[in-house]
Amino acid sequence: MAQWHAQTLADALTRSAELLPAQEALVIGDARLTYGELSTRVDETARGLRVLGIRRGDHVAVCMGNTVEWAVFFYAAASIGAVTVPVNTRFKPDELAYCLKQADVKVLFVADRFLKIDFIGMLRQVCPGIDHALPDPALPKLENVVVLGSDVPKAAIRLAEMLALGEIHDEPVFDDVTPGDVLLMQFTSGTTSYPKGVMLTHDNMLRNAAYVAERFDLKQGDRYYSARPFYHVAGTTLSLLAALTVGACLLSSESFDPGVALRIMSDESCTHTSGNDTMFLMLLGRPDFDQYPLKLRGGWASAGAEVSRKIVGRMGMTGLCQAYGLSEASPNVCMSWHDDDLEKRIDGWAHVLEGLDVSISDPETGKELPPGATGEIVLRGWSVMKGYYKMPEQTARAIDRDGWLHTGDYGVMDEDGRLRFVSRIKDVFRVGGENVAPAEVEDVLHRHPKVKQAQVIGVPDTRLIEVPAAYLILKEGEHATSDEIIEWSRTRMANFRVPRYVKIVDTFENIGMTGSAKVQKNKLRAQALIDFGLETKT
């Protein structure tokens, strides 16, 4: 790649619109936009946001499935220097309220309904003022709610109304935005019960997207299908922005459905796709898989060797690349080159992105380890986040005084500088692509009136790779069944956080305690495999 020149998202969109005005940029559902049309829509939306009082540095949230409107709102907010806060559509009311309040959101852009979820009803629970006047004491910073759909409360406005306001006032759109300004605030699971808002800049995300696009051979005019949710950095940086930086067309779906995905990739002659283990297993497991002729030549995956081999063999993705990253790194740290040795790629070896320093260190001593040794992945350089929003102590724990980001992940490097992710040091586990911190689930379980102590770990699952399992000690004299706890949990946390298995115990002493009276998660997980009959799924 030629030398990188720092730029803003508006710069990148303007360049693509000028060079490729008639080429398709986005295809989602029934909506199709060329780069020229996308630029026009973004400008119209930015003017509407300006009328609502949004300026450089303000925080705006988006809560909906993958749609053209999601992308347009993101680009429009960026063009005036606002920070987009993606909202996970699987959040329950308490999680939504925390996100909007912690991020100081000023405008919420929300679909009235999505996958049978009534977002307006949910919003009424956490912000009663939506039916009267905003701001509401519960969310004092939230001044406006813009609704995509027909269920529009009294204090909210329709998207069409916002756009009409922009046409009437016709305010200048572009502010003095710089590449170093924050572009996105990505909420990520951590080892505490409180998700953290990762602040990523225009330069963080655009440079990451451009480098990654080159790695998996995405070029101008290619057609890249990605159903990665836009509320994840894999959906923004590695999907939307990767396509934008090279002038490719991004195709997506409002949500991931393997049958829909196969049909789109086949009908639209897609050249690339991406996903994690779960997504690819769902695609390959379709009984009608062979009815969809694919023309894929490449893409990227976060998957093990067995799944990767199936992807290459059955989907024809001979240019498949392996990826490793985390939100705090914008997110990609390393990705294979599409023409690197195939067996190396299948086995998970990937090259560190240009300009990043990556080291494998002893997690106890911090000492750098030699090639072939497994230790904690640490990195520094242009992709590292600005920090966690309003969490200076957590930021200082994540990024040391020398600028090294401590990932909490185990990895190993070979003699040629390739990096391979091994496992997570932290207790965080992934449920079908969603990060779950045990402390988040434990925090909710501790609200149950009968629960004295809760411990949560991830256990293997055939479809989702991992799912939550909970061990509970009840308060003296109380009785509860596993099913009762699970059903109670379903109404209080996102589905991917709900324990699939629950066991009531009297003590954790016989399972394993540390000297500081903490339950040893590795021993608890080993016991869970026995208790829940999961040994064969490891």
Image (tube, rainbow, N blue to C red):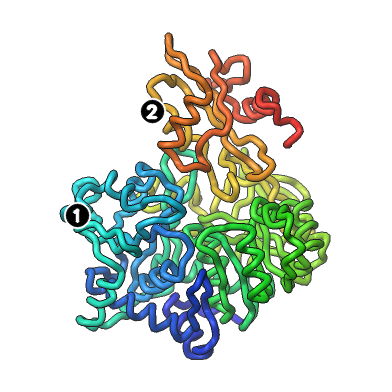
Give the numbered dot on residue 135. 1
In the foreground, 170 or 335: 170
Nearer the N terminus, badge 1 or badge 2? 1
Label 1 crowd bin: few (<14), some (14–19), many (20+), radius 10 Å: some
**Can you say which quadrant of the picture contains the C terminus?**
top right
Q: CA distance from mark 1 to mark 2?
A: 29 Å
Residue drawn 71% across and 55% down?
286
Give 419 or 261, whichever is nearer the viewer.
261
Residue under label 2, please give it: 447
In the rendered image, the vertical position of residue 336 relative to residue 17, given as above or below: above
- In terms of secondary structure, where does tag 2 sit? loop
For label 2, the crowd category at 10 Å Cα-Cα, with few meaning under 14, some 14 to 19 and many 20 or more, is few
Identified by mark 1, the residue type is Pro
Q: Does residue 538 appear to the left or right of 332 in the view shown?
A: right
Residue visible at 27% across and 83% down in the picture: 172
Residue 282 higher or lower than 496, as above or below: below
**Percent of width and height locating residue 205:** 50, 67
- Residue 525 falls in which quadrant of the image? top right
Spot occupied by residue 29 in the image (x, y as percentages of width and height): 51, 69
Element assignment for label 1 = loop
Q: Position of residue 105 (x, y in %)?
A: 30, 57
- Direction from residue 188 to residue 414 in the image, left or right: right
